[in-house]
Each structure stands twice: as structure tokens, then as C-alpha cells.
Image: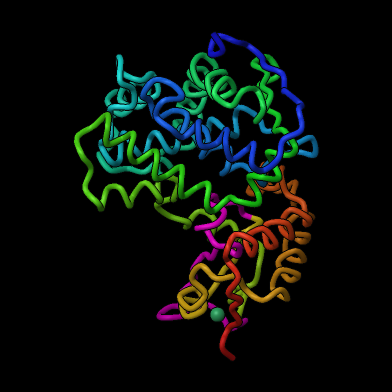
Amino acid sequence: MSFKLREGSLNHAYLTDEDIWRIFSSLMSAKSSKSATYKYVLFKSLIENLYNVNDHLELTYEQLAYSFAKMYWNMVAVNGITNHNSGKNARTAVIIMDYQQAHQVPPGWAFDRLAGETQLQIINKMKAAMKVNVFGALYGDTDARFYAFDHKAERLHFHPQVYKFLLNYQSLLVQLTNFHLGKMIEKLNSPLSAAMLLRIEDLSKRSSLKPFEEVLLSYVTKTCFYCQKPLQQGNRQTQVDHFIPWSFVQSDQIWNLVLSCGPCNNAKRDKLAKEDFLVKLIDRNEELLDKMEDGNLTGQFTAYKAEKLEMMYEYSMKNGFDEIWVPSP
Ligand SMILES: [Zn+2]
């Protein structure tokens, strides 16, 4: 059985977009494996990390386990969705319930509010659980065509055509996956309220971007990235903005975050800023990269390249984020 595998190599057969859609659709359908939520959550984790790949289109288990742990934590501990498998309790949910009890975490605490060390312990446990049940199962469900994996090297490697497909259709794929994840959760738990279903879209959202604000403030001048007015109290209070909208990237990399005033942040919402600002952000990131040896930035730029940011900009436009915003003078 594929989920027992310790490694799986890629079926390199040429794939058209149509082939990939067919595999994706059967993956999403309830028939493809027993009733469980893990495959949707792993797929969402893959999408969240599309821009974190190295030059060989590889992701580490650590990167994926972070997304996976965060989403399960937010489902189980924050939203009280505890059933994730039609058989016995899912290992992933048990890990979280045990942690929540043992450490008496207040109900409703999002993953990013846990101490860094606690997050790391949960991520490591998730990673071990994923090795047993998760990587191999999705690999089997996608006929060895989406990715190769290796438990020893703790790496996953995308099929290049699939990688390109995921970039091209990212927004649509996320919406479809959220929809099917919601249906599976309803099947395994009592029917969810509409409000709860909507929250599935926000499973990866942080409760606060404040820690990023503090890091950025220690490196850049206290002015709005867009209108350049000084950031002060009142309605020009400092806010953290996802340059490429969060609703597209669904993750928080410091190289995609800027300090903004309230009016600019509110007006921009999930639009793209004019291309001049992309150039400006690349320059800013160069400056931050020069300060890499500083403790606050360690690890934040591992996956960063200016070309990646340009790629995100281009692909977000292709995915329907084509309204361009400029700050009012
Ligand atoms: Zn502004």
C-alpha cells in the first residue's frame, strides 16, 4: 500500500493541463480514499508553499509540516472541529488535543500565538505523523504524477508541469479545495454553520502581524511604503500590508510584507499595487538581505529571490488579481 512507502519516485510521463485537472478532480472526490481531511490539508499546504521551493522545485517536510500543523491547530483547537477521519480518531487531531490539554492552552488561541518552541514541538510531531499516513497516500492518489518524496532526505519534489499548473490556477484550486474540505468536515462532524464554512478560507490566517511590524520597524524608516507619509498614532497608525494580497498567497513571508498607513492599507485591500512599488519592494528586500546576519531576520529570506516576487506578481494577475491600485496623493 502506498501510504507505507518511505519514498516514491516521480512518474515523468508528459502531462497536459487536462490530465492534471483529471487527477485533481479525482483527488478531490470523496471516492479517491477513505473519508478523511488530511489530503485536502496537505494539498493546501503544497499550495501555500509554492513560492518557498528551492531551485529544484523541492520543499522540505519542515515547511509543509508547518502549514499542516497550523491548519489542523486552527481547525481543532480554535474552531472545535475534532473529527477528521471516519474510522478512529485522526492522529493529527489527537496530537493537537493532547497538546491543548497538557499545556492548558486557552480555547480560541490561534497557532501563531503559541510560543515558538511549542510550535516547533507540534510541527515535529506532525511531521512524524505525515510520514506514516500522509505523504505516501496523496502520492498514491495522484498516481505518482504530482510529486516525488523521500522520508530520509525529508524532501518533496514537484513534477515541473504540475508545479506550473499549480501556479497558473492557484486561486481556483484553493477555492475548490476549501469547498471539498468543507464538505468533508461536514460529513465527519455535525453540519457546520455558514459562518464556520467561511472560516475555512481563513484557516491559515495569522491572528496578528504585530511581530512582523516590530521586525520591520527596526530596519526601515517609519513611513508608509505607499504614500510615504510618516506613520504616527491615530488614523496614520502603522499597519502591516501583504504587498501581494494575502487572499492570493495565503502565507506571510517578511519579503512580501510592508509597513503602511491605515488609509492606504484600507484602500488597497486585496488589489495589486502599481508595478513601481514592486521595484521598490525588491530594493527594500535587497537592503534587508544585507542585514541577514542579524538575529531578527534569520531564516526569513531562505526562499527569497527577487524573481520569485516578480513571479508572484505576474501569477496573481493571471489568477484574477488584475485591478491595479495607486495611493491617492
Ligand atoms: Zn499611506
Q: Name the quadrant containing residue 285.
A: bottom right
Asked whether residue 217 is in view, the answer is no
Front residue of 195 and 31: 31
Residue 234 in the image: state x and y as whole percent: 40, 80
Is residue 178 in the magenta section?
A: no
Between 28 and 88, the one lying in front of the other is: 28
Q: Is residue 249 above or below residue 157?
A: below
Q: Residue furthest bottom?
A: 329
Q: Is residue 206 above or below residue 177?
A: below
Closer to us: 302 or 4 = 4
Where is residue 297 drawn, in percent x and y? 66, 49
Coloured how? rainbow
Q: Residue at x 44, y 28 (%)?
A: 38
| Residue 249 drawn in magenta | yes
Residue displayed at 44% across by 21% down: 33
Relative to 268, is 116 above or below? Answer: above
Ligand 1 falls in quadrant:
bottom right
Q: Quadrant of the C terminus?
A: bottom right
Q: Which residues are magenta?
A: 227-254
**Is the residue 265 above or below the residue 7 in the image?**
below
Residue at 37% across, 46% down: 200
Give the number of marks. 0
Q: Is residue 329 visible?
A: yes
- Left-right relation of 166 to 286: left
Quadrant of res 13: top right
From the top left corner, tell me how far across and down residue 44 is, in percent.
51, 40
